[in-house]
Structure formats: structure tokens, C-alpha cells
Image (cartoon, grey):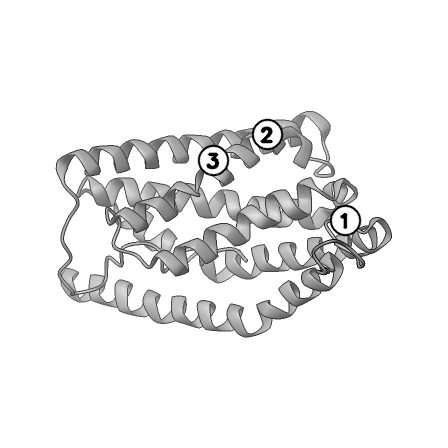
């Protein structure tokens, strides 16, 4: 599942009044570099989508124009788990791992592995949502680390998720659903009995369980972000008054 689009819980909450130890100078420099690179990467993806659309005059099959950078930079987000684990980012390792791995899973274990779904419009739906989300998110991180955060970026981070988060989740669910017949037909990643380990695994059933897991998780994350938006932007207005 896509992480909360604007104001994800794996970020440092700028609206929180709790005091947190800031990373050292070396760690801060590294994090700034990482976020700048990731911002540039997702901008490359955005430009690729727009250029291909203008050249083809159609939004169909745009995925192929950005497949490689999408895989590279989405997989690069795995470093965020490391950042939490070593303590240079004060976020939950478990929550960050869940959010990052859900996207990496969709990128590699669904979209890459089931090539038949790459033509689906639902893929473009979550790719566009992810792209806008990540550009804003990494810009937010970068400027926050530099202690110079423009209000427009903060506003975008805590507002655009209202549309982008449901958009991304819808694209993800439709893509997994479209993959189901091909997974069932080919037995992709499934392990059948009998075997020497006396273990079986049905990837088709696993994907259905993944889809079902969205039911309790999505509302919790979405309404958490609504709460975060009120807290952060309301406190900003009070400061300006």
C-alpha cells in the first residue's frame, strides 16, 4: 500500500511539539544529498511521463517510458528503512518498512512479474499518484533539513494526499486484481505439495489477502493524515496570526 501521500507517518512530524534530537552534521549532509537525489529521480519520472504523453498523444502504455527509473528510485526507498534502523531519522522502523516494502512489492512482485498488467490504466493511476507524492515528500524533507521550508510545500504535503492517496490505493488494488487471473493460470511464485520441505504457498491467495488488508489499513492511515493536516496547518495559521 502506498504510504500516506502527504504527511506520511514515516516522516518527522513538523507539527509535533515533542523535542527530538537532530541528526549530526554528517548525517544531515547525507540526508540532504539522499533527498535531493530522490527528488531528482522522481522528477525524471514525471518528465518522462509528460514527454511520452506529448509524443504519443495518448496516456496508454506510458509505463514503459519510465519503467527503469521507477524501479530504481522506488527500490532506493529501501534506504529509508536503514535510516530509521540506525537512528538518523526518528521514525518507526516497523511502520517505515511496511510502507516502503508495500510499494517495492507492488513494483517488483506484481507489476514487473506479471507483465500482462503493465498495459492496464490502473498502473498509470498509481504511478502518477506516487510520482507527485514523492516529489513533494522529498522536497519537504530537503527543505526541512535545511531549516528553510516554504509554506507552499508544507501545504501541498498536507493537502494533496486528500486526492492522491485514494488515487494511488485505487490504482494499486486494480492492478493486483488484474494480475490475479495470470497468477492463477501460471502458478507464479506458488509452491505445491508434495515437496521435500512439506510446505505449500499459494501466491494467488496471498494477493487476495493483500487486497483484503487494505480494508482496515487504508481508513486508519487516511484519517490519521486528516488529523495531522488539521494539527500542522492550524498551528501554522495560529503562528501567522
Name the one closer to the observer, 59 or 101.
101
- Label 3: which residue? 42
Identify the residue at the far front of this view: 196
Relative horizontal placement of residue 159, taking residue 164 as reference (left or right): left
Q: Is mark 2 in CB contact (under 8 Å) with mark 1? A: no
Residue 152 can be seen in this image: no
Relative horizontal placement of residue 51, taking residue 186 as reference (left or right): left
Residue 241 image offset from top left, x and y in percent: 14, 64
Question: For the residue carrying disc 3, how many other residues have a C-alpha within 10 Å: few (<14), some (14-19), or many (20+)?
Answer: many
**Mark 2 vs mark 1, CA separation in Å:** 22 Å
As drawn, the label of residue 68 is 2
Label 3 element class: helix
As drawn, the label of residue 50 is none
Label 1 element class: loop
Q: Which of marks 1 and 3 is nearer the N terminus?
A: 3
As drawn, the label of residue 188 is 1
Q: Earlier in the sequence, mark 2 or mark 1?
A: 2
Q: Residue at x 28, y 63 (%)?
A: 233
Residue 109 image offset from top left, x and y in percent: 65, 47
* Rendered-image quadrant of the N terminus: bottom right
Relative horizontal placement of residue 109, taking residue 166 as reference (left or right): right
Camera-side mark, 3 or 2:
2
Q: Which residue is drawn at 64% across and 70% down?
A: 212
Name the one closer to the observer, 102 or 2.
102
Answer with the quarter of the image where residue 70 lies: top right
Answer with the quarter of the image where residue 7 lies: bottom left
Answer with the quarter of the image where residue 146 lies: top left
Residue 185 image offset from top left, x and y in percent: 86, 52
**Mark 3 vs mark 2, CA separation in Å:** 12 Å
Q: Residue at x 43, y 54 (%)?
A: 97
Residue 127 image offset from top left, x and y in percent: 59, 44
Amino acid at each position: 500500500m502506498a504510504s500516506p501521500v502527504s504527511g506520511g507517518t514515516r516522516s518527522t512530524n513538523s507539527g509535533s511539539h515533542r523535542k527530538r534530537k537532530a541528526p549530526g552534521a554528517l548525517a544531515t549532509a547525507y540526508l540532504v544529498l539522499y533527498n535531493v537525489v530522490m527528488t531528482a529521480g522522481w522528477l525524471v519520472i514525471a518528465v518522462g511521463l509528460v514527454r511520452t504523453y506529448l509524443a504519443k498523444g495518448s496516456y496508454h502504455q506510458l509505463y514503459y517510458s519510465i519503467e527503469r527509473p521507477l524501479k530504481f528510485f522506488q527500490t532506493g526507498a529501501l534506504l529509508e528503512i536503514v535510516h530509521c534502523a540506525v537512528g538518523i531519522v526518528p521514525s518507526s522502523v516497523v511502520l517505515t518498512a511496511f510502507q516502503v516494502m508495500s510499494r517495492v512489492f507492488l513494483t517488483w512482485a506484481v507489476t514487473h512479474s506479471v507483465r500482462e498488467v503493465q498495459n492496464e490504466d490502473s498502473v498509470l493511476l498509481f504511478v502518477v499518484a506516487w510520482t507527485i507524492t514523492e516529489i513533494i515528500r522529498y522536497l519537504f524533507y530537503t527543505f526541512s533539513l535545511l531549516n528553510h521550508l516554504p509554506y507552499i510545500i508544507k501545504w501541498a504535503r498536507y493537502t494533496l494526499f486528500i486526492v492522491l492517496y485514494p488515487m494511488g490505493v485505487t490504482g494499486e488494488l486494480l492492478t493486483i486484481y488484474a494480475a490475479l487471473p495470470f497468477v492463477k493460470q501460471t502458478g507464479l511464485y506458488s509452491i505445491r505439495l508434495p515437496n521435500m520441505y512439506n510446505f505449500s504457498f499459494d501466491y494467488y491467495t496471498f494477493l487476495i489477502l493483500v487486497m483484503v488488508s487494505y480494508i482496515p489499513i487504508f481508513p486508519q492511515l487516511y484519517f490519521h493524515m486528516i488529523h495531522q493536516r488539521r494539527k500542522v496547518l492550524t498551528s501554522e495559521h495560529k503562528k501567522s496570526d
